[in-house]
Amino acid sequence: MKTIIEPFKIKSVEPIKFTTKEERIKLLKEAGSNPFLLHAEDVLIDLLTDSGTSAMSAQQWAGIMNGDESYAGSKSFYKFEKTVKKITGMKYIIPTHQGRASERILFSIVGGKGKHIPNNTHFDTTRANIEFSGAEAVDLLNEEGKHPEIRTDFKGNMDVEKLKKFIENTGSENIPLCMITITNNSGGGQPVSMQNIREVKEVCNQYNIPLFLDACRFAENAYFIKIREKGYTDKPILEIVQEIFSYADGATMSAKKDALVNIGGFLAINDDELAQKCRNLLIVTEGFPTYGGLAGRDLEAVAQGLVEVLDENYLQYRIRSVEYLGEKLVAAGVPIIEPPGGHAIYIDAKRFLPSISPEQFPGQALTCELYIHGGIRAVEIGSVMFGKYDSEGNLIPPSMELVRLAIPRRVYTQSHIDYVAEKIIEVYEKRSQIKGLKITYQATMLRHFTARFEKIDD
Ligand code: P71
């Protein structure tokens, strides 16, 4: 394969701090063996998330200076609205401060006890907002998507047959909307095919259920469609994106991902009545509908980011740089979800640490080791994040124990990534020495953010 270069020059840099292994052991202990509780300054390469961690372009920074901070009717809002409308084709665009604010507003209105929301896989904030409203969040991922070692093109696809059965059994009147998350973050950043989106929409139409997209990584998903799905190779990304949204009745968006900004989000809706209700709730909790919890300058940066993310050179570099890390790990035998996803590499902690049971959180144990060994911060997506408990307090683990290495957009260079691969491979070589963990503190919801752990010494 020919070298694909970063399609940008670096105009402004931020130094990173080097620490010793001894310092990191102490720092991690103080953080309760939870990388979320580390000071970011003490992290060398931060792969905790690709959310809100993008480097903005000179044009976006120029937009920041151009922001119109009028309380109502800001010029920046109309620019933002125009851009989002062009991409989504939706009638109503409601700015929010981030994705979960869109989710909370939407599910406070359509959720509630007795309601059920299917998705390919709900991300944790979506699930939490649905459950917080009293409704049930249901995952209907295609079987392939549940097997890390199977290499197929669209492992984020929803199981359409399961969806039909689910609707028949639950009753369409109890399903206010169906969602598809593009790309499927919890399932490995795997894309959803256009065909699958179309088929899900057809089923939704049969039962009169609106289809909503959780659109955080819509451009990355569109690029996968372009390179993997028949009939899309010669289509411009914008056209692919527009087709994706044409099948949806609404979308929740965290602009912190594919809008290349550090904060922001929106709700896009076609239905008049639902949009009106969302706006009314927005005014109570986020702000006036032309800023929705953001500054005018943030809206400018989102509008510009949404243009830049559709650039094919950018997307080619983006998808390739994640794949590059994946290839290095696979070549060394490190088990990952294959093929690599769009925004992250997911290490299969079950195969990496087969002797640590889900009760002892193999994913969390691995994130600790990556920090201690290489100063790398990753996030566990496994029993800590998604574990449930039966009435006797026994863990019901999710199907996968993963460690996510999320790659911030336009932030790290190829040598940073080479270093990450090198360190992970070194950890893999001494994996038999890694010990499991037990929880010493946990919150009742979204426990992974604040839980504290201790090493189990046997
Ligand atoms: C990610 C995040 C942000 C995050 C969440 C939990 C732990 C660590 C970091 C956020 C998403 C997402 C999808 C598919 C909705 C949200 C919420 N992802 N849907 O992956 O991936 O957006 O953060 O702007 O509220 O690191 P929000």
Image (cartoon, rainbow, N blue to C red):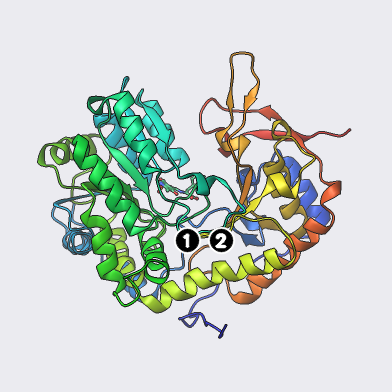
Residue placed furthest toward the bottom:
2
In the rendered image, which quarter contains the N terminus? bottom right
On screen, residue 147 versus residue 117, left or right, reads right
Q: Is mark 1 within 8 Å of ligand 1?
A: no
Tell me residue 63's x, y (percent): 29, 70
Residue 288, placed above or below residue 261: above
In the image, what residue occupies the spot 78% across and 57% down?
A: 428
Confirm or deny contact between disc 2 and disc 1 (CB under 8 A): yes
On screen, residue 290 versus residue 106, left or right, reads left
Q: Which of 160/273 is in front? A: 160
Q: Secondary structure at mark 2?
A: loop
Check disc 1 and report the residue beneath it: 153
Tell me residue 53's x, y (percent): 48, 60
* Dot 1 alpha-carbon crowd within 10 angstroms: few under 14, some 14 to 19, many 20 or more: some
Residue 447, placed above or below residue 67: above
Q: Is mark 2 within 8 Å of ligand 1?
A: no
Check disc 2 and report the residue beneath it: 339
Q: Of circles 2 and 1, which is in front?
A: 1
Q: Which of 151/61 is in front? A: 151
In terms of image quadrants, where is residue 258?
bottom left
In the rendered image, which quarter contains the C terminus? top right
On screen, residue 448 versus residue 329, left or right, reads left
In the image, what residue occupies the spot 23% across and 52% down?
A: 247
In terms of image quadrants, where is residue 149?
bottom right
Q: Is residue 394 visible?
A: yes
In the image, what residue occupies the spot 69% across and 55% down?
A: 335
Q: Real-space Cα distance between discs 2 and 1?
A: 8 Å
Residue placed furthest toward the top:
392
Q: Secondary structure at mark 1?
A: loop
* Dot 2 alpha-carbon crowd within 10 angstroms: few under 14, some 14 to 19, many 20 or more: many
Q: What amino acid type is highlighted by mark number 1?
A: Asp
On screen, residue 400 versus residue 307, left or right, reads right
